[in-house]
Amino acid sequence: MFELSNMLLISLFLIFLTSLIIFVVKISKPTTTKSKITNLNKLPKPYPIIGHSLAFVGLTQQEIFDWLSKIISTGPTSTIVVHPPFGTPSVYFGDPASSEHFFKTQFLKYEKGAHYKTVFGDLFGDSLFTQDGDVWKTQRHLAGLEFTHKSLQNFVENVVNPEISERLIPFLSDAAKENKVIDLQDLLKRFGYDNVSTITLGYNPGYVSPSLPDAKLIKALDESMILSHERFYAVFPIIWKVCRFLNIGSEKKLKKSIQTLREYVKTMIKSMKENPEIVNQEKMNLLSKIIYEYRFDEKLTIDVCITFILGGQDTTSSALTWFFWLLHKNKHVEQEIVKEINNNKKIIKKNIVEELKGMTYTHAALSESMRLYPPVPVHTKLAATDDVLPDGTKVKKGMLVGCFAQAMGRSEKIWGKDWAEFKPERWLREEKDNTTGETKRSFVARDSSAYPVFLAGPRICLGKDMAYLQMKSVVSAILGRFKVVPATDDGFDPVYVPETIAKMRGGFPVRFEERVQVE
């Protein structure tokens, strides 16, 4: 009780101090206003003790993020140091040299660290997302075994394609006939969850169906990530820690959401152990491999499954939501993709993976979309030791250091003066075939240090190829049959919400129209 009383007193003191700071700012002339933010290309000097808190008072998290992103993408060094009140400064950068330093050459100097584990440990436990060192290496090696060419082939043929043909296309056909307005972001999340649940747990919950059933597991995932994200950027972490101890407020909601997820996976574990005969050796899902091959204990099994589900569901749905919005704004790109889809149908191929990989222009358009609207806006780790970034910025041990992927995607220094254009051609190279005389396009990948959408270095995303295959399957299926028409006002300007996994605020309401098929 003595420890609890001390925590409460400290928490109340910090709340009082924060309120006092806000009051002082409101009665004085503000140093920063929403109307002035767009004209500021640098952060003001921090004050002792309270850091940059005065500059951020009255701003939403979205506005702060946009401001920081602009400073990083247009600043002379592409690096900023943010000073929170009472806390350790954080460093954010947006240039390829620092990215390569951070992700590759000085990889061992940056780790998830205690802060990340404390914040996300309740959700991800001891899985890959929270680990460093040998534990991380072991889990990553095992995870890598799930992304072989054979597993990708199985994923497309036995998971993605059936979900498209048996659920997604019939659903869209009915929606088109009835002229229904559908939240595309929600639909893509449902599709992603059905897919990843199938390959992870061996069970498809059927969230893409005419009735659009209550997706309680998706809601639990969303709430868990949002509340954990709020923990990560909390000005006074002691407040959420007290709330967690008392099981009140947002911490009570977080605990309930995580419990929903863990109990669900626990039920699937029990079912698989009681019915081992249902495991198909040719199409083993991740859970069955963990149980019968890797033999993790139950807690770690649950941790790994939740991590895998989150990583495979939210990122692709986020990327595709913004992709379809950009196609609406750039009809010439949509026409090129539809042309590629129709040409692809005429080419008979036995290997569906190779067929999807052949969708070069679509691949470029997806990459370009994620440049402007990356599913993960910022990649952060803690400095395990003192360091100096290539531009001379000093990093002290214990500092939070983040690669601002969204700012990098909008940097003129990286992408040129036309960086604001949605231009898939920047990813393509045209070459003439000497035999046929035809001009062919080939995809030219950017160095991951300049395009860290899928991270870079030893932690580069293992599911990158799987994500592209899934997204191209969805794009081909939808645009080959339907036009996606936003059901919004002409002045609709979607907001990019920079949570742990970015989303479009309020969803993306659309209608589907049957496309006239040309033979």
Image (tube, rainbow, N blue to C red):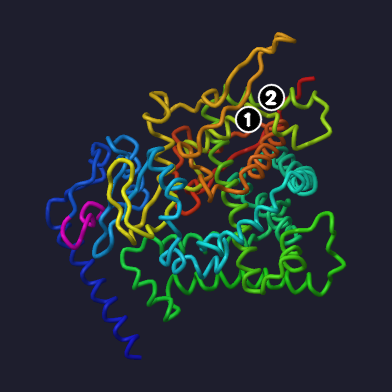
Dot 2: what SS? helix
298 w.r.t. 30: above or below: below
Few, some or many residues within 10 Å of mark 1 (<14, 14–19, 20+): many
Position of the C terminus by quadrant: top right
In the image, residue 399 lies at what x, y percent? 33, 58
Q: Position of residue 450 (x, y in %)?
A: 45, 36
Disc 1 residue type (three-letter): Thr
* Between 121 and 65, the one nearer to me in the picture: 121
Compared to residue 369, the image places residue 418 above or below, namely: above
Camera-nearest residue between 436 and 215: 436
Left or right? Give the position of 154 relative to 219: right
- The residue carrying mark 2 is 340
| Magenta-span inclusion, residue 51 | yes
- Picture quadrant where residue 436 is located: top right
Secondary structure found at label 1: helix
> To which residue does mark 1 refer?
362
